Image: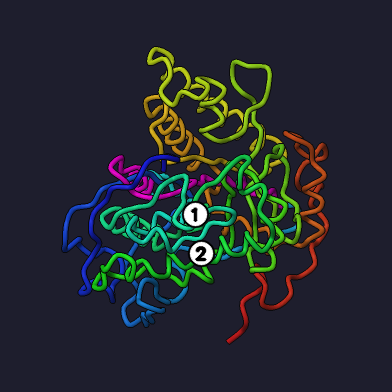
């Protein structure tokens, strides 16, 4: 969502749909929209909770436990000498559905191209403006937010998209709440305790959207957000040091708030460092961060709608740069490619076109898995730590000189029982 833009959307499904959760008709009003993005290998179409499955409401019924997430592939260890898959993660900051209908659009793009994605929800997009005083941002007065709040219609539409996205195998992370950047109380100045407060409040707004909107008969979100929330990206990529300390203590598994080269991930402060990356900036002599906002700043400056005559060209530059980064990894060290975006129509919407064309170009290629951050973390956790360490020794774009079969020929240690990638227990 735009930093200054409010979400507009429609009322969600009625109580009669609550047991099914997905595929319910909107029984109150129409819906508005935003954007979405890509994930894993070919999966069956999203479906309601399995027949006979138990739907256990949590709290006021804003969320519910419905069992294991559908379409979440089981992570497997690499076999000796096996070339790693090429992972690509498409992610969205401040995900929500507004009149642009970008969230719903990119859900369709993802399904069409065998992809799943990560949606970083801003907590205040689940809080109506008339309840703004419930938000107590660190170092700011209650009810303050640099991205505003939502209305009932916008919350209902966003819930509809979040519900469908999760049932399709996508991840719901967090972009926190008020999006405070820079000096004067920005997230870069927050303490560990203040970050913990911000995280808890982001969860609370998701877990109480029914109470805060009065939509008591709407269907719940089909997940327990306390368990679902395992990663985040901080506003403006600031405050990473204290955030990761707080996040590790609160059970998070990864962070994607940094800037890195196209290398295999390592753990930092107990979390997988899945930072966005620098890729060749087509037509320039320097590398560019894999985020739409940064392309915009380097093309049209602070103008979100620059010269109309250049907008299509700028979108092509972004697409070609992302594809150049993909090719460098795909043919080289196979490091996961991490891409960040916003549901925005900056520079005529050409960055959205660039992302969509990138999804279409890469996600159906051989050995490519367009996944969520959660799925990537699952895969990394499933590997022998020595294998991951060996992968981190490869430089940017560097394929093993002796070939993958020789480079990863050593037999990895068996996975301990109960961890991702371990053999299934015998009945």
In the depicted view, which residue is nearer to us: 153 or 259? 153
Question: Does the rendering let one see residue 45?
Answer: no
- The colouring scheme, among rainbow, by chain, secondary structure or one colour, is rainbow
In the depicted view, which residue is nearer to us: 8 or 251? 8
First in sequence: mark 2 vs mark 1 = 1
Q: Residue furthest top?
A: 309
Above or below 312: residue 143 = below
Picture mark count: 2
Which image quadrant is residue 151 in?
bottom left
Q: Position of residue 210 (x, y in %)?
A: 32, 69
Q: Position of residue 254 (x, y in %)?
A: 65, 57
Membership of 356 in magenta stretch: no
Q: Which mark is residue 201?
A: 2
Above or below 95: residue 282 = above
Check disc 1 and report its element: helix, strand or loop: loop
Q: Position of residue 297 (x, y in %)?
A: 54, 25
Marks 2 & 1, CB-CB < 8 Å contact: yes
Above or below 35: residue 317 = above
Check disc 2 and report its element: helix, strand or loop: helix
User: Residue at the location (55% across, 46% down)?
Assistant: 180
Q: Position of residue 117 (x, y in %)?
A: 48, 51
Q: Which mark is residue 177?
A: 1
Q: Residue furthest bottom?
A: 427
Where, quadrant-wise, is the C terminus in this rendering? bottom right
Q: Which residues are magenta?
A: 82-108
Q: CA distance from mark 2 to mark 1?
A: 8 Å
Membership of 101 in magenta stretch: yes
Where, quadrant-wise, is the N terminus in this rendering? top left
User: Residue at the location (16% across, 57% down)?
Assistant: 29
Q: Residues within 10 Å of mark 2 (few under 14, many from 20)?
A: many
Q: Residues within 10 Å of mark 1 (few under 14, many from 20)?
A: many
């Amino acid at each position: 969502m735009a930093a200054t833009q409010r979400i507009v959307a429609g009322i969600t499904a009625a109580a009669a749909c609550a047991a099914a959760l997905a595929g319910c008709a909107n029984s109150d009003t129409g819906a508005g929209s935003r954007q979405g993005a890509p994930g894993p290998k070919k999966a069956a179409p999203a479906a309601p909770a399995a027949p006979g499955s138990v739907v256990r409401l949590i709290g006021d019924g804003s969320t519910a436990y419905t069992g294991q997430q559908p379409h979440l592939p089981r992570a497997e260890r690499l076999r000796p000498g096996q070339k790693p898959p090429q992972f690509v993660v498409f992610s969205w900051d401040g995900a929500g559905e507004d009149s642009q209908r970008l969230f719903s659009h990119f859900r369709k793009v993802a399904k069409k191209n065998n992809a799943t994605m990560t949606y970083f929800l801003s907590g205040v997009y689940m809080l109506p403006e008339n309840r703004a005083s419930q938000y107590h941002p660190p170092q700011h007065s209650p009810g303050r937010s640099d991205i505003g709040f939502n209305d009932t219609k916008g919350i209902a539409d966003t819930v509809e998209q979040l519900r469908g996205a999760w049932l399709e195998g996508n991840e719901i992370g967090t972009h926190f709440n008020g999006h405070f950047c820079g000096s004067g109380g920005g997230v870069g100045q927050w303490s560990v305790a203040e970050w913990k407060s911000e995280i808890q409040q982001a969860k609370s707004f998701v877990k109480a959207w029914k109470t805060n909107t009065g939509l008591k008969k709407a269907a719940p979100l089909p997940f327990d957000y306390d368990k679902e929330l395992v990663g985040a990206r901080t506003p403006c990529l600031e405050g990473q040091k204290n955030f990761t300390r707080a996040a590790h203590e609160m059970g998070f598994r990864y962070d994607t708030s940094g800037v890195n080269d196209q290398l295999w991930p390592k753990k930092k402060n107990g979390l997988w460092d899945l930072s966005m990356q620098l890729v060749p900036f087509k037509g320039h002599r320097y590398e560019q961060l894999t985020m739409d906002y940064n392309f915009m700043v380097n093309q049209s400056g602070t103008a979100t709608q620059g010269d109309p005559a250049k907008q299509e060209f700028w979108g092509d530059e972004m697409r070609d740069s992302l594809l150049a980064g993909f090719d460098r990894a795909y043919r080289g060290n196979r490091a996961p490619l991490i891409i960040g975006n916003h549901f925005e129509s900056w520079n005529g919407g050409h960055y959205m076109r660039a992302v969509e064309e990138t999804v279409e170009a890469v996600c159906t290629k051989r050995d490519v898995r367009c996944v969520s951050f959660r799925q990537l973390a699952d895969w990394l956790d499933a590997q022998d730590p020595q294998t991951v360490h060996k992968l981190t020794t490869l430089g940017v774009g560097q394929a093993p000189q002796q070939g993958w079969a020789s480079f990863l020929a050593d037999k990895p240690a068996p996975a301990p029982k109960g961890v991702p990638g371990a053999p299934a227990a015998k009945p």
